[in-house]
Amino acid sequence: MLTARTIVTTLGAHLLGAALSHAGPAEDCNQVRDLNRQLRGCTAYIEAGSIQPQNLATAHVNRANIYAQRGDHARAFEDYAAAIELDPRNPLAHYNRGNAYYDTGQFELAIEDFTRAIELVPGFALAYFNRGRAHERVDDDEAAADDYRSVLKLDPKAKAARERLKSLRSR
C-alpha cells in the first residue's frame, strides 16, 4: 500500500531525476527501492555540490525523508532546513517537514509547513488533508473541516477526507 509519504518521496525522487540525467550519486539518490543506496547517493550528491540549488535541495529532501522514516528526526530537520534555504519555493520540502513535525507531535509547526506548501501549490490535496489532521490534534475542528472540504473540492472521491469530515460532524 502506498502512503502519502511514499508518493511524495517518489515524486521528489522523480523531480531530481527529471533535472539530472547522468549516472552515479544522482541516479542512486533518485531511486527509491533501496533506501541505503538512496541515502548514500543523496549524501554523495550533496557533498559534491551542484550548480543548481533546486537539484541540491531535492537531494536534501530525499535524504531527509529517509532519516524521517528511520526516526532520525534531528538529521531530517537539518536536511529539510537546508533544502528550504536552497529552494524556499520547493513545496515538497515544506510538506515533508510538516509530516516530520506532525510525527514528532509539533502540530503548530506542521500546520505552518503544510500552509506554506499549499501557498506554493494551491491544489496540493495531501497538504490540505494533513493540515486538517494537524488542526484536529490542536482541537481546531472548524479549520480541520475546512481543510477536508478543500480536499473534497480538489478530489471528490477522497474517501479519507470524507470520513474525517464525517467524524468531525459526529463529535
Image (cartoon, rainbow, N blue to C red):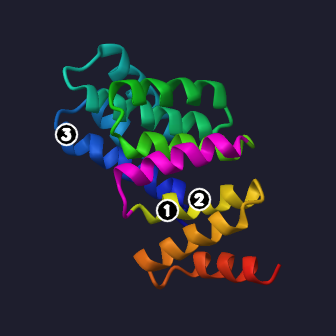
Q: Which residue lies furthest to the left in this view?
A: 21
- Is 146 or 129 nearer to us in this picture? 146
> Given the image, on which type of amino acid does mark 3 rest?
Ala
Graded by Cα atoms within 10 Å as few (under 14), some (14 to 19) or many (20 or more), the crowding at tag 2 reads many
The amino acid type of the residue labelled 2 equals Asn
User: Is 102 left or right of 64, judged from the image as shown?
Assistant: right
For mark 3, give the secondary structure. Answer: helix
Which numbered marker is on residue 126? 1
Main SS class of the magenta portion in the image: helix
Label 3, label 1: how far apart the Cα atoms are: 24 Å
Q: Are circles 2 and 1 on residues that touch, CB within 8 Å?
A: yes
Residue at which label 2 appears: 130
Q: Where is residue 39 in the image (x, y as percent from the top left)?
A: 47, 31
Mark 1 Cα-neighbour bin, 10 Å: few <14, some 14–19, many ≥20: some
Question: What residue appears at the point 78 percent right and 59 percent down from the top-left corner?
Answer: 139
Q: Please, is residue 123 above or below residue 100 in the view?
A: below
Q: What residue is at 49 percent from the left and 26 percent from the top?
A: 81
Magenta highlight range: 106-123
* Closest to the observer, 81 or 17: 81
Residue at left 72%, top 40%? 104
Q: Can residue 38 be seen in this view?
A: no
Q: Can residue 21 be seen in this view?
A: yes
| Observer-nearest of 20 and 94 | 94
Secondary element under disc 2, as helix, strand or loop, is helix
Name the residue beneath numbered marker 3: 19
Q: Earlier in the sequence, mark 3 or mark 2?
A: 3
